[in-house]
Image: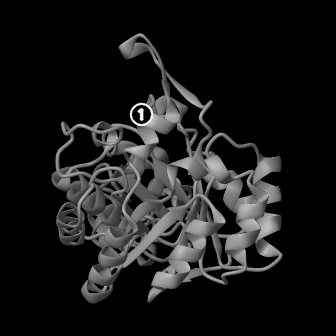
Amino acid sequence: MKLLKIGKSKIGDNFPTYIIAEIGGNFFTFEQGKKLIDTAITCGVDAVKIQTFKAEKLVSKHATFDMPNIGGKRKQLDIIRKLELNENIQKKLFEYCKNKKITFFSTPSHPNDINFLENIGTKLYKIGSDDLTNIPLIKYVSKCKKPTIISTGMSNMKEIKDAVKAFSSKNSKLALLHCVSMYPYDPKYSNLKAIHTMKKEFKIPIGWSDHTKGIETCIAAVAFGANIVEKHFTLNKNAKGPDHALSADPRDFSNMIKSIRLIENTKGTGIKKPAKCEFGSLKNVRKSIVASKDIPAGTTLTNSFLEIKRPGNGISPNKLNLIIGKKTKKMIKKDDQIKINYLR
């Protein structure tokens, strides 16, 4: 697997999972953003992410959302315009994170957004699932020669291959995120085995972008091999806004990261052999061949003279056939282990 380096972090198998707190859409002022960032750092994240867009460049006036909870359709432009984040706030947050030594990056939706992010000095890009087939945008961001993460929600392998090919023609600093683009959705649709499929196909870091309620799917994704985990982050899951309900709050996020770090430590090398902590068990819990009764010297051993009992520091039961038919050199008392030097 080709590693991806973001700042001092190396991303790939056998390296710590890269944890991203997605805070875009969950704040509107600099102070709110700063508080989210500070709390995310306390939780132990590696990076925080926002979204950079101009609503009029993102959707047309004809785009709608089906919203059965309010009995009809709403224009996307009306909803998304409210989520647009002031560029000055983005600049200030970028500088704040720079001083805090935490990676701050964004998902652009238009070449103009990329130009803006280049001007403020971004070191990392994210392409959202909605732009996976936007090959012109992917080619544009690839020319920046920055590490880039592309989400793959709603896509099939042919579309992902096309996106990777378009990006890789100018830039090899790439990772992909398996993703399900519904907000939120039932975890049964997660298809986490796709992480393995994508790793085998592309041989680059593959991560997981989560849109479920709760943290369990993120933890499971790491067990399935995810090198990156992106999860929406909020200070209050009951706040008004489209992403708060599916976001993790500080307690959830901290618990998620602790669980991910625990899972990382359980993966091991893949080589099947006794663990160091099992060495005592080999002696105490495994079994050996012992005398089932007092055995006089000169006795030819048969099964009737033998039993298998703990501890396991004698002749292993898998060598039973090697001692059947042997004669004893000395008296062996009941429950004593049979030793090779007792036999001839």
- Secondary structure, mark 1, is loop
Q: Is any atom of residue 50 visible in this view? A: yes
* Residue 129: % across, % down: 61, 49
Q: Which residue is mark 1?
A: 184
Residue 124, compared with residue 290, is above or below; it is: below
Residue 260, compared with residue 121, is above or below; it is: above
Please name whichever residue, 56 or 184, is drawn nearer the observer in this view of the structure.
56
Q: Is residue 299 left or right of residue 237?
A: right
Question: At 25% across and 62% down in the image, what residue appears?
Answer: 258
Question: At 24% across and 51% down in the image, what residue appears?
Answer: 234
* Residue 309: % across, % down: 31, 52
Q: Is any atom of residue 299 visible in this view? A: no
* Residue 260: % across, % down: 34, 60
Q: Is residue 322 left or right of residue 22?
A: right
Please name whichever residue, 180 or 312, is drawn nearer the observer in this view of the structure.
180
Q: Is residue 61 left or right of residue 255?
A: right
Residue 68, compared with residue 114, is above or below; it is: above
Q: Residues within 10 Å of mark 1 (few under 14, many from 20)?
A: some
* Residue 105: % across, % down: 45, 72
Quadrant for the N terminus in the image: bottom right
Question: At 45% across and 74% down in the image, what residue appears?
Answer: 340
Question: At 67% across and 78% down in the image, what residue appears?
Answer: 2
